[in-house]
Amino acid sequence: MTVDELLAQMLTLSAADRRRLFRRAQRMGLLHLPDLEGGDAGETSPAPVLTPAPAQSELMRAPMTDVAPKAAPARAVTTASAPEAARLIDLRPAPPASAGVPAQLAPRARKPTTAKPATSPAEIRVRVVFDGGSKGNPGQGYGSYALLWPGQPKPEIMRLTFGSRVTNNEAEYDTLINALQDLADRAQAAGGTPAQVFVEIWGDSLLVVNQVNGTWKINKAPLQARCNQVRALLQQFGFAALNYHPREESVALLGH
């Protein structure tokens, strides 16, 4: 039977019979019909799109189970500026000049990178670890924070003391505020802005981390005021993330 004869036979069928025929042919892989549903029995069915059946060898090789689509190959992720190509603002304190080395060359011994336009954004990335406490709760408050700079093996650690009626949580907040304000001040003193600082912050206070990140409620006015201050400081930086780590991480670095 020719194709024309087959089509002539199909035209003698009712619309409902043609739809049943098309569905069966689609299940058998003989054709693809985008829209078999819709319309009343008297409507004319859209013309089927015939697709060739796969060769027998392909059918024998085809698995009987569904195969998940292959994932697209991962694309290489590029950053806006690589560490070696970026023009960095140096917020670290200048080390003492060694004998025979000019003071202005002490912070950097490498050759300058290719000159960039004055509008090119400078960046500095730093990791901050903070911890605070109180002797008596409330009592004498204290705190420490460490600044870990790229390419500098030893952290820069700052020690703080607060008032005599400070709680542990207040000391934690006050230490973090001092660390963030220190970074913002250094950026401005170096001729830049806090927006050029990318800071990653770690602390062992679940209360401070979760309240600042908005996952815990704040029921005390002194903590609410401190939390607002931390959030305002974080907004100044180009990137800031506040994370929790176990207490032993703070002790290992800060000593308390």
Image: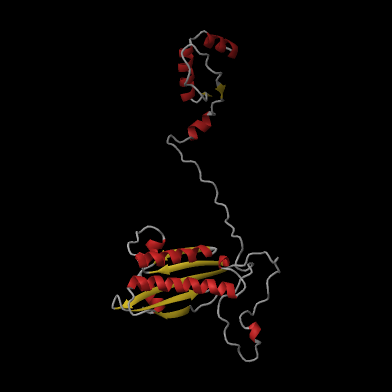
The percent position of residue 69, horizontal first and vertical second, equals: 49, 41
Q: Quadrant of residue 97?
A: bottom right
Is 111 drawn above or below residue 216 in the view shown? below
- Nearer the observer, 13 or 167: 167
Is 109 drawn above or below residue 48 in the view shown? below
Q: Residue at x 46, y 41 (%)?
A: 68
Quadrant including the N terminus: top right
The percent position of residue 84, horizontal first and vertical second, equals: 62, 69
Is 200 drawn above or below residue 93 in the view shown? above
- Nearer the observer, 116 or 173: 173
Residue farthest to the left, as pictured: 136
Residue farthest to the top, as pictured: 12
Is 57 drawn above or below residue 153 in the view shown? above
The percent position of residue 171, horizontal first and vertical second, equals: 37, 74
The figure's colour scheme reads secondary structure
Counting the numbered discs, the total is 0
- Nearer the observer, 240 or 170: 170
Quadrant including the C terminus: bottom left
Residue farthest to the front, as pictured: 221
Q: Quadrant of residue 245?
A: bottom left
Residue farthest to the bottom, as pictured: 99
Q: Residue at x 48, y 35 (%)?
A: 62
> In screen coordinates, is 96 left or right of 147?
right
Q: Residue at x 50, y 62 (%)?
A: 235
The percent position of residue 16, horizontal first and vertical second, equals: 46, 13
